[in-house]
Amino acid sequence: MEFGEQNWQGQVSHTYLEEIPKILGMPEEMVVWVKNEMARIQSTHPSPGHASFDLAKLFYKIIFDYKTYTAIDLHGTSLAIKHDLNHQLPELGKYDVVTNIGTGEHVFNQYMFFKNIHDVTKENGVMIHVMPNQGCYDHGFFNYHPTFIFDIAHANQYELLAMYYSDPSQRPPALSRISSREDYIRLAVDKKLSNYSGLHALLRKPAQNLEFKIPRQGYYDSQLSPELQLAWGRLER
């Protein structure tokens, strides 16, 4: 399930899709299948730009081998469910993987947006978030900080499988693993944060079916270490 139907935007050439099965050591029949699918997509669409939604779905098929695909997007293809994510979703079932790749920042009702993601994710399912951290000037309503991820995970008993800070201003773009709140604050203290950056987070929903809970910020919920308490008073804000 995608919150925001994704397309292959072109920062990475679409020809890279043919290399992924080889890189992952997949069987030769998968390599051939992907090559044939690429040829089919290119024969159907006049340019990679027109083919971009199909290319994204091919990427997902390679990585997830999905059996069911659903997207919610007011401006997506004819496959997408047209729904304003400021409002509660109708009953759509539950999914093993739910993505929010550059969509949440455009939705004003953050409570309903993240509740909707919670509600459509299966128990033990994975939520994938790609979010603006800094920059993306006037791109949406919000930027997000690691405290958002840590605190929503704490409130809802999500397992934080991985979080990365991305800096696309570097060449090649850099990824830094954020394993704790302290990791990000050290980047800030050392002035290693970029004016244009993002957060990538993978969260696993718990096995038990729990109602979505609104988080409280860790600083006000006595979750910060002495190191972070000290940084809180010293960093600009």
Image (tube, rainbow, N blue to C red):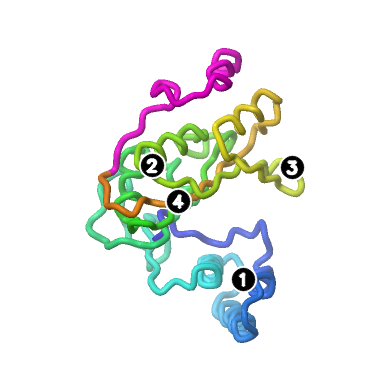
Q: Give the SS element for disc 2.
A: loop
- Find out whether residue 231 is within the magenta segment: yes
Q: Is residue 105 above or below residue 12?
A: above
- The residue that disc 4 covers is 100
Circle nearer the N terminus (3, 4): 4
Q: Quadrant of the rendered structure where residue 152 is?
A: top left
| Residue 194, x across and y down, in percent | 67, 33
Circle nearer the N terminus (2, 3): 2
- The residue that disc 3 covers is 170
| Residue 23, x across and y down, in percent | 69, 70
Residue drawn at point x = 48 percent, y = 45 percent: 160
Alpha carbons under labels 2 and 3: distance apart: 29 Å
- The residue that disc 1 covers is 47
Alpha carbons under labels 4 and 1: distance apart: 26 Å
Magenta-tinted stretch: 212-237
Q: Name the mark nearer the viewer: 2 or 4.
A: 4
Q: Amino acid at mark 3?
A: Gln
Quadrant the C terminus occupies: top right
Q: Name the mark nearer the viewer: 4 or 1.
A: 4
Q: Give the SS element for disc 1.
A: loop
Q: Residue furthest right?
A: 171
Circle nearer the N terminus (3, 1): 1
